Image (tube, coloured by chain):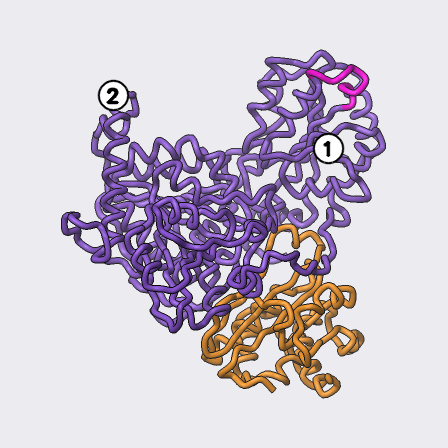
Chain colours: A orange, B purple
């Protein structure tokens, strides 16, 4: 379990349109609300056209570079199975890979909530209290999708026990 | 109001512009700069997309010719090439209010056709340049740029890069929103009418202003004999000298500063926020107090060259680090003098034209007809990738038409008759219309065929409006530029409008006939972008706020 006086490095990866940037916005906001220094970084542009997208989120007492270097990620959250291989190099030895297979798609009200479900799994491994997660989810998701996303988040949080 | 917020660098620039009472924001969309004006508009600022960056800068300059009126103009690095003509002479005319030119570079080419380093423009035009490294500094240095601009009556360049624009970091607002002073026009012919007699004087005035700013930046550490100058009062510093432990001293600016802090936490650091003019006296002092002075910068070795040219002994980075973005591990390699080949990282999935994208039918036809395709800048540049591979050139905004015409002028007839120019609607308005004039004025012997990929939006940068959509930046209706009417007025032989997806056979037949006909033909392939279509339907509803 990372301690919060060190910098925690998370990379969220997937394909354009899967909600990678939304997921990293929610994570960054939850860490921000928990009173941590936060930096979040990604590259827009061509990635919007269905290509690979990755977003780096770093938080702790003091964060310098907004980018996660190779071999430095504590967590790699991947929304699309094909995107594990191109991003695996960011994980540090002993880092945790959170993959879509962790979530049973049939258990999701809406398949588009996979990003939030995987954040739920990540949340179980981070020292950010549930109230900050809830506030970050509410601030970043439309009101009519709130219940489905809240259930997806809890589903993921429950599934985290299956992580190595 | 002053509690911390988590904002992108682009949002930070917009917030500072709003807090400082900027009267007008202009620009043309371009990754990674696009969100500045959109955020400025959301915050209640008066913001507008212009047809291109040159016009945007001219409009902003005109606004800043009014007393007390502050303006900001935003663009990506290649947009500054388009705006360079007014930029260089705006340095001479100066401003009466304030003018900030925010330019966003794209080191590593996430979404651009080159990775030019805009810091060269500050030197070439003779304009002050500030470089923030995160969102707080983007806010602070926007205020600083406005202050410098208002004090020295000069446009000021605010140079951003992808990782400053699109990273979210924490910032606190430093000032409460300021109402501007009374805005009005005062005649000042010698300052603003750049006939040679006045421009000669204006050039000397410009250099004197830069010299004064340089002296201020030198502060106590340099600028000997300079008159006492009142300090700047806005938040943020022109440079920041941080004492470390040990012999290593790093001179840096922008995002590279944060990589350097992490790669070498013990180092002394001279962080330059004002990167033109440079406080070379302070840099000399810094270099002399450290055992080893090295410049860490992304892109061109701009700082290293300028510092060495002043006779200050500093190390620069190895040539491999001119290319692409820096990060912490690359900075470690630079510090270690390691120029060995870097590990090749696995490539992700390439972007592609969306399923259902109206451009697909066009490129399928061009591939089938084995056309020589002069392409342009937009989503449709993806037509170069499999399965289409239907593009033979892509240079800059609007170049498809000129390049296509040039090929037609010299190629043997059999090849010339296969040349097609392909350009998007927003790109045509930006820089393609003069190409159509050239086509009518100097028609190639075999005629020419231009296909406008009219998807009713500026898709590539995130679905922005342009004059052809008939809506302004905030999607409110305005006069619509009608492309077919423009083309007819220019005097082309034939102008066709067709939906390439709905009638692919008709479209293919039209292209085939046009290639064979030897006339000057413009084909508008018109169908809304599938990502934009639902939004466009909403905008076109009489009551746009009514949910579906």
Please check the rendered image and state whether residue B411 is part of the magenta-colored stretch, yes or no.
yes
Give the quarter of the image for residue A88: bottom right
* Residue B24 in sight here: no
Disc assigned to residue B197: 2
Both marks 2 and 1 on one chain: yes
Across and down, in percent, residue B471 comes to 53, 41
* Residue that appears at 79% across and 30% down: B507
Of residues B522 and B401, the one nearer the viewer is B401
Please check the rendered image and state whether residue B301 is part of the magenta-colored stretch, yes or no.
no
B41 relative to B353 in the view: left or right:
left
In the structure shown, which secondary structural element does the residue marked by tag 2 occupy? helix
Across and down, in percent, residue A34 comes to 48, 80
Q: Are marks 2 and 1 in contact (CB under 8 Å)?
A: no
* Residue that appears at 45% across and 34% down: B54
Residue lying furthest top: B445
- In magenta, the rendered stretch is B409-418
The chain letter for the residue carrying disc 2 is B
Q: Which residue is mark 1?
A: B392
Total numbered circles: 2
Across and down, in percent, residue B2 comes to 34, 69
Pointer 2 or 1: first along the chain? 2
B140 relative to B367 in the view: left or right:
left
Of residues B451 and B332, the one nearer the viewer is B332
Distance from disc 2 to disc 1, alpha carbons, whole Å, reads 47 Å
Quarter of the figure that contains the N terminus of chain B: bottom left
In the structure shown, which secondary structural element does the residue marked by tag 1 occupy? loop
* Residue B271 in sight here: yes
Relative to B436, does residue B39 appear above or below in the rendering?
A: below
Determine crowd level at label 2: few under 14, some 14-19, many 20+ residues with C-alpha closer than 10 A: few
* Residue that appears at 63% across and 68% down: A70
Relative to A122, does residue A80 appear above or below in the rendering?
A: above
Magenta segment, prevailing SS (helix, strand or loop)? helix
């Amino acid at each position: 379990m990372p301690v919060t006086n060190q910098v925690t490095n998370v990379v969220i990866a997937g394909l354009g349109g899967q909600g990678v940037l939304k997921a990293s916005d929610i994570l960054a906001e939850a860490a921000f609300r928990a009173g941590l220094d936060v930096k979040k970084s990604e590259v827009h542009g061509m990635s919007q056209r269905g290509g690979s997208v990755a977003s780096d989120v770093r938080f702790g007492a003091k964060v310098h570079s907004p980018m996660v270097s190779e071999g430095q990620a504590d967590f790699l959250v991947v929304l699309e199975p094909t995107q594990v291989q191109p991003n695996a190099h960011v994980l540090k030895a002993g880092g945790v890979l959170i993959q879509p297979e962790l979530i049973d798609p049939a258990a999701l009200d809406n398949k588009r909530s996979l990003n939030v479900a995987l954040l739920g799994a990540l949340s179980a491994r981070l020292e950010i209290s549930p109230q900050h997660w809830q506030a970050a989810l509410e601030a970043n998701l439309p009101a009519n999708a709130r219940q489905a996303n809240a259930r997806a988040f809890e589903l993921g949080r429950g599934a985290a026990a299956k992580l190595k | 109001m002053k509690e911390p917020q988590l904002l992108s660098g682009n949002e930070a620039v917009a917030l500072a512009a709003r807090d400082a009472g900027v009267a007008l924001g202009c620009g043309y969309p371009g990754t990674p700069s696009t969100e500045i004006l959109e955020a400025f508009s959301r915050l209640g600022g008066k913001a507008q997309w212009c047809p291109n960056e040159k016009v945007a800068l001219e409009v902003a300059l005109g606004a800043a010719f009014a007393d007390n009126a502050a303006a900001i103009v935003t663009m990506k690095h290649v947009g500054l090439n388009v705006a360079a003509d007014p930029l260089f002479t705006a340095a001479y005319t100066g401003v009466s209010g304030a003018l900030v030119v925010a330019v966003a570079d794209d080191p590593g080419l996430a979404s651009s056709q080159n990775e030019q380093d805009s810091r060269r423009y500050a030197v070439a035009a003779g304009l002050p340049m500030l470089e923030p490294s995160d969102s707080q500094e983007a806010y602070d240095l926007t205020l600083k740029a406005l202050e410098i601009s208002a004090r020295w009556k000069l446009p000021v360049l605010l140079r951003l890069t992808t990782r400053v624009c699109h990273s979210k970091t924490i910032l606190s607002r430093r000032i409460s929103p300021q109402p501007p002073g009374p805005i009005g026009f005062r005649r000042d012919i010698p300052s603003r009418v750049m006939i040679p007699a006045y421009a000669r004087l204006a050039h000397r005035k410009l250099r004197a202003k830069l010299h004064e700013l340089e002296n201020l930046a030198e502060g106590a550490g340099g600028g000997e004999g300079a008159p006492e100058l009142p300090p700047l009062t806005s938040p943020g510093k022109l440079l920041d000298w941080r004492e470390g432990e040990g012999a290593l001293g790093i001179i840096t600016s922008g995002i590279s500063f944060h990589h350097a802090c992490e790669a070498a936490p013990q180092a002394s650091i001279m962080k330059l926020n004002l990167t033109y003019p440079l406080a070379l006296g302070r840099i000399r002092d810094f270099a002399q107090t450290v055992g080893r002075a090295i410049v860490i910068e992304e892109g061109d070795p701009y700082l290293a060259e300028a510092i060495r040219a002043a006779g200050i002994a500093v190390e620069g980075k190895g040539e491999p680090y001119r290319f692409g973005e820096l990060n912490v591990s690359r900075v470690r390699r630079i510090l270690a003098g390691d120029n060995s080949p870097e590990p090749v990282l696995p490539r992700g999935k390439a972007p592609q034209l969306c399923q259902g994208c109206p451009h697909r039918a066009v490129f399928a036809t061009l591939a089938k007809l084995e056309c020589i395709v002069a392409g342009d800048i937009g989503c449709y540049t993806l037509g170069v990738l499999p399965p289409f591979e239907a593009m033979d050139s892509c240079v800059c905004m609007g170049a498809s038409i000129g390049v296509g015409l040039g090929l037609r002028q010299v190629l043997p007839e059999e090849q010339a008759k296969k040349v097609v120019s392909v350009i998007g609607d927003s790109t045509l308005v930006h820089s393609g219309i003069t190409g159509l004039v050239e086509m009518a004025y100097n028609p190639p012997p075999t005629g020419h065929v231009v296909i406008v990929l009219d998807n009713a939006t500026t898709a590539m940068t995130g679905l922005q409006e342009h004059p052809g959509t008939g809506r302004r930046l905030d999607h409110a209706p305005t006069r619509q530029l009608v492309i077919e009417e423009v083309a007819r007025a220019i005097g082309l032989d034939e102008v066709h409008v067709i939906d390439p997806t709905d009638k692919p056979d008709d479209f293919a037949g039209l292209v085939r006939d046009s290639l064979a006909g030897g006339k000057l033909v413009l084909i508008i392939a018109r169908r809304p972008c599938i990502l934009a279509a639902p939004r466009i339907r909403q905008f076109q509803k009489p009551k746009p706020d009514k949910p579906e």
